[in-house]
Amino acid sequence: MKTRRTTAAIADQLAVLGEPVRLRVLRVLESHELSVGEVSRVVQLPQSTVSRHLKVLAEAGWLVRRSEGPATMYRLVLDDLPPSLRVLWVPVREQVSAGSEAHEDLRRVAAVIAERRTDSQSFFGRVGGEWDAMRAELFGVGFTGAALLSMVPPGWVVADLGSGTGNGAELLAPVVKKVIAVDQNEAMLASARDRLRGFRNVEFVRGDMERVPLTDASVDAAVMLLVLHHVEEPSAALGEARRIIKPGGVLVLMDMVAHDRADYRQMMGHKHLGFARAGVEGMLVRAGFVAVSHRELPRDAAAKGPGLFVAVGRV
């Protein structure tokens, strides 16, 4: 009789773990104590859906919860789990942690925790918090990036390689002498022309990233913003960027970190599933760039795509 009850209990717990999202939630909550809203942001599901899963997990004994003001905080504490649950979770956790989805969840957790710290500092440092809100109300939220771009030498000519609809050129045009927006797609260039019609210092050129129609050493800098993963031969594109940049110039490359979302190939025509750091640095060096640097960008908790990196190479 006892064996039957034990078997039934194990079957019930396996049913609880049968939902993949619950496994993700448990993995996340073992790393940090989070509220319903924070878990929702990490797993990118509606709060109502997350609440249902948390209720099931808590009632099954997987989670501890406590109130903090109006919020309910949840946490998986391994040492507090009953032995029967602990023996199930440890091997399951190893499998869950191995996937890229778990890695991305933990990146979003880090972003949520960082924002929580900022909120806390704003709350307790009342003056700072009030000033931030006042500044956003008075001036908006996009001026900081524009101000920092003003450090770019105003006499520069910058090639925006794979310019798309012109969002990069739009940021550069106010602070440099000239922007050359290069894209192989005429529809993209038409959108960019419409977007940038107020600027007189933007030239639009149709061309392939692997055969850029610009002369050698004709620009002071080049940017490639979320374009390299669309290029069949990334090394050739980087070699072309190196060819058109003057001595002393710089390439700024932003793209996705390596990921395994194979559906991006069919959905958006991606040729490459992001790039690993070693691969990017190696391609830049082989293309002839020096003083190469690479940095992963902070993750936006609301972002649904892979993480991003920025790499810089000098000529």
Image (cartoon, rainbow, N blue to C red):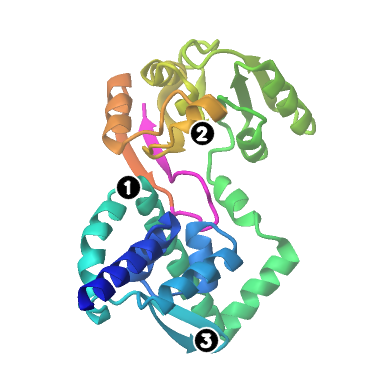
> Magenta part mainly helix, strand or loop?
loop
Q: Which element carries disc 2, helix, strand or loop?
A: loop
Farthest residue, direction front: 1
Type of amino acid under label 3:
Phe
Q: CA distance from mark 2 to mark 3?
A: 38 Å
Q: Examine the image and state in which quarter residue 259 appears.
A: top left
Q: Nearest the camera: 157 or 83?
A: 83
Instruction: Say which of marks 2 and 3 sits in front.
Output: 2
Distance of mark 1 from mark 2, alpha carbons? 24 Å
Q: For the residues carrying marks 1 and 2, which lies nearer the camera in this image?
A: 1
97 displayed left or right of 185: left
Question: What residue appears at the point 28 percent right and 21 percent down from the top-left corner?
Answer: 286
Q: Secondary structure at mark 3?
A: helix
Q: Amino acid at mark 1?
A: Gly
Up-down relation of residue 112 to residue 169 (above or below): below
The mark found on residue 226 in the picture is: 2
Is 1 left, or right, of 228 in this rendering?
A: left
Write down the region rendered in magenta.
Answer: 298-315
In front: 308, or 181? 308
